[in-house]
Amino acid sequence: MSFLAQTVRQVLRQVPNRSSALAGAMRSLSISPAFKQQNKPAAESVDISAIAKDHQKEGLEICERINRQVAKSEQGRLFAVVHLCGKQFKVTPGDIVLVEGYWPPTTGDEISLDKVLLAGARDFTLVGRPILEPGLVVVKATVVEKTLSHTKTHFRKKRRKQYMRINFQRSPHTMIRINSIELARPVDGKSEAQESPKRLF
Amino acid sequence: MSNSHLFLKSGFPRAPLQNGVGRYVCQLQRITLKFCKNNGSSRGMRDFIENHLVDFAKENPGIVVYVKPRRHRTPVLVGEYLNGEREWMSCRNNTQEEISKWVDLLKTQNGSSSSLRLRKMWHTDVPSIQGPWTPFLLRSPESQGQVYPSEEASKPLETPQTATEKLIELFRQQQLEAGEEAHEVLNKKRAE
C-alpha cells in the first residue's frame, strides 16, 4: 500500500509540469495569433485598455464610413473571394466560374455561395477569419452549363517491360454565372464570436 | 497516343449570349432519337422511348423531340443547339439508364461538347477593382525615395554584436564607472 501511495504522490508531483508542457503543445497547435497566447503579465506602464479603446473607436468609425457609403450606394462594384468545392475563386458580378468534378446542382439552379472569405469594393475590404459572418455578404449565382471536359489521355509505359496502358477519361464540368454580390446588412465592429445556432457547419 | 493534344484547340470558358445573367435559357432546341424497331442494339433506346420519353418532353417544353424509326441501323441521338451546332452520338447497345444519362448531358450542355482544352477555370470582364498590385503598393514614401546603392538598405536586418564591439562596450562601461568613482572621490574631498 505504501508503495502505491508513493507512486501516486510521484504522479501528483509530476502533474503540474505535465500540464504546462501540454499547454505549450496546444499553444503551438492553435491558430489564434501569437500575441493572444503570451501568458506573461503585460508591462504595467503601458495602459492596454486605453489602447484597445482607441482601436475599437477607430474600427467603429471605419465601419460607420463603410455603412454610409453603402447606404448611399456609392461603393461601386463589389468583389468577393468564395470557397467553392475545395477551391477559392475571386468573383465579381458577371463572372464565370467552372467547377470540376461531380457536383449535384443542375442547370438553371440559383444558388448562393455562403463561404465568403473576403469581400471588397474600391475603398474598403472586409476580411474574414477565415470566413465572414454568415449572412453579411450574399453572393448569388446561376448554374449555366453542365458538360464534360475534353478527352484526357492517361498513358503509362514502362520501358523494356512490355507494359503499356492507355486510358481515356472525361470529367464533368459545371459552369456557374455569378449574378450579384451584396452587403446584406450594415457592417458592425463587433467580433464574430456570436454564431447563430441554426447552422450545422 | 497522347500527341492528339497537339492539335487540340484551347480556349477560355465562355457562356453563349450572356446566358444566366438575367435568367437561364436552355440551349438545346431539338433532339432526335433514331432507332430500329426490331434490332437488339437499339433495345435500350426502345425502352427509353417507352418509359421516359413522354416525361422528358413534358418536363422540357422548350425542346422539340423527334423520334425516327429506321430499319437495321444503330440507335443514334442527335441534339441541335441555339448556336447552330449539332451533336451526333451513337448509342449502340446502350441500356435505358445510359441513354437517359446521355440525353440529360445533351440537355444541360451549351453546345456540342467539342474537344476544347480550357486554359482557365474562370472568366471575368473586370479583372481588378481595387487596382492591380504593384511593388510600390502600401510602401512607405521613404523607401520609394531611396537612392541606391545605399549603405543602410544593403545592411542585413539583424547583425549580432561582434566580440570587438562587446569589448569596446565593456571598456566604456568600466571607464564610466571609474569616472563616477573619481567624481565621488572628488566630491568627498570637496566636502571635506
Image (tube, rainbow, N blue to C red):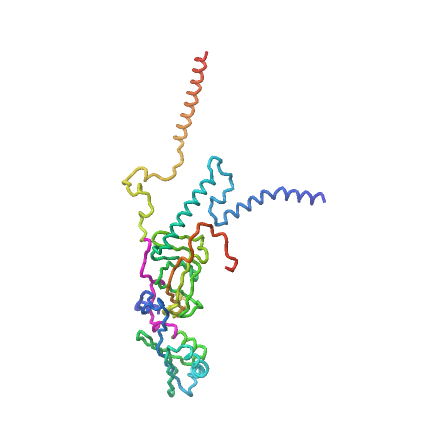
The verdict on residue B52 being magenta is: no
Query: In the displayed image of the protein, which residue is found farthest to the right?
Result: A1
Which of the 4 image quadrants contains residue A17? top right
As for residue B117 lying within the magenta part, the answer is: yes
User: Residue B55 placed where, x, y %?
Assistant: 44, 80
Left or right: A7, with B114 as reference point = right
Q: Quadrant for the N terminus of chain A, please.
A: top right
Residue shown at 40% from the left, 31% from the top: B163
Most extreme residue toward the top is B192
Residue at 39 percent of width and 75 percent of height? B107
Question: Is B144 drawn above or below residue B20 in the view shown?
Answer: above
Frontmost residue, B47 versus B115 = B47
Task: Please state which of residues A97 and A21 is positioned toward the viewer in this rendering.
Answer: A97
Q: Nearer the viewer, residue A153 or B94?
A: B94
Identify the image quadrant of residue B27.
bottom left
Q: How many marks?
A: 0
Q: Which x, y percent locates residue A24? A: 53, 45
Residue A36 shows up from this direction: yes
Q: Position of residue B190 (x, y in %)?
A: 43, 13
At which x and y percent is residue B19? 34, 69
Could you tell me if residue A162 is visible in this image?
A: no
Q: Main secondary structure of the magenta part?
A: loop
Identify the residue at image location x=40%, y=77%. B60
**What range is drawn magenta here?**
B107-130
Q: Quadrant of residue A54?
A: top left
